[in-house]
């Protein structure tokens, strides 16, 4: 399971292996960040992000990707830029044929901490406790990515079955787009 906290400057991620038994949500395999150069144009940063997420998917072969949904703040430009980052992450997951789950930030915090308005240090501490780690994942963006993965694992349907992979791009039917001019 790959959890992602999207951003165009820093994207946090966490790879968590689901636990075979109840009581512990899983085992942390890897966490970290994908950092882009803010001096570069947005398209170059999005390419770095897409390549980074694609490489994580190829290396860990998760069955699903969970991503934090857009937080609607006062700054419309920031929200739009975050949407670009989410778009390339969703594209990488879709191209790999993975199940995709999206969670609002408040749901991630409530699932991991128990309160939808929890602060970043509280999220990091609870990630440490839930996964029985010696210290919280760092930096905080990585801890947030792990929290998104845990949210998926905590809220997934219970049972021994694993989510099925979606069909990859070569197995999908090609879609036809009908262009109609309007007068």
Image (spheres, helix red, strand yellow):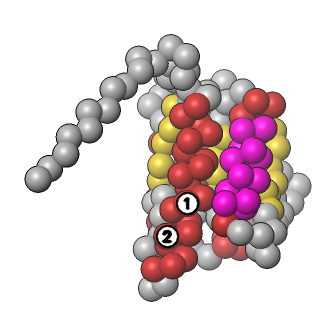
> Which residue appears at 69% of the width and 47% of the height?
50
In the image, residue 22 lies at what x, y percent? 60, 32
* Residue 54 magenta: yes
Quadrant for residue 12, please give it.
bottom right
Identify the residue under disc 2: 80
Identify the residue under disc 1: 84
Pointers 2 and 1 in contact (C-beta within 8 Å): yes
Whether residue 125 is situated above or below residue 31 in the rendered picture = below
In the image, residue 163 lies at what x, y percent? 52, 23
In the image, residue 58 lies at what x, y percent? 76, 30
Quadrant for residue 109, please give it.
bottom right
Quadrant for residue 66, please give it.
top right
Query: SS of the residue at dot 1?
Result: helix
Q: Which residues are magenta?
A: 43-56
Closer-to-camera residue (22/80)? 80
* Residue 121 magenta: no
> Which residue appears at 78% of the width and 38% of the height?
55
Horizontal side of 175 relative to 13 (left or right) equals left
């Amino acid at each position: 399971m790959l959890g992602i906290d999207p951003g165009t400057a820093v994207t946090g991620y966490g790879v968590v292996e689901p636990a075979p038994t109840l009581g512990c949500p899983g085992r942390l395999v890897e966490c970290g960040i994908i950092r882009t150069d803010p001096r570069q144009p947005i398209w170059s940063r999005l390419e770095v992000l897409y390549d980074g997420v694609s490489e994580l998917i190829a290396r860990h072969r998760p069955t699903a990707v969970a991503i934090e949904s857009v937080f609607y703040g006062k700054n419309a430009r920031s929200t739009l830029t975050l949407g670009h980052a989410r778009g390339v992450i969703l594209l990488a997951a879709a191209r790999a044929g993975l199940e995709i789950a999206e969670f609002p930030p408040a749901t991630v915090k409530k699932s991991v901490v128990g309160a939808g308005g929890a602060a970043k240090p509280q999220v990091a501490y609870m990630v440490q406790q839930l996964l029985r780690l010696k210290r919280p994942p760092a930096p905080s963006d990585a801890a947030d990515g792990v929290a998104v993965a845990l949210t998926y694992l905590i809220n997934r349907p219970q049972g021994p079955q694993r989510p099925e992979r979606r069909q990859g791009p070569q197995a999908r039917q090609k879609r036809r787009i009908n262009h109609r001019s309007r007068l």
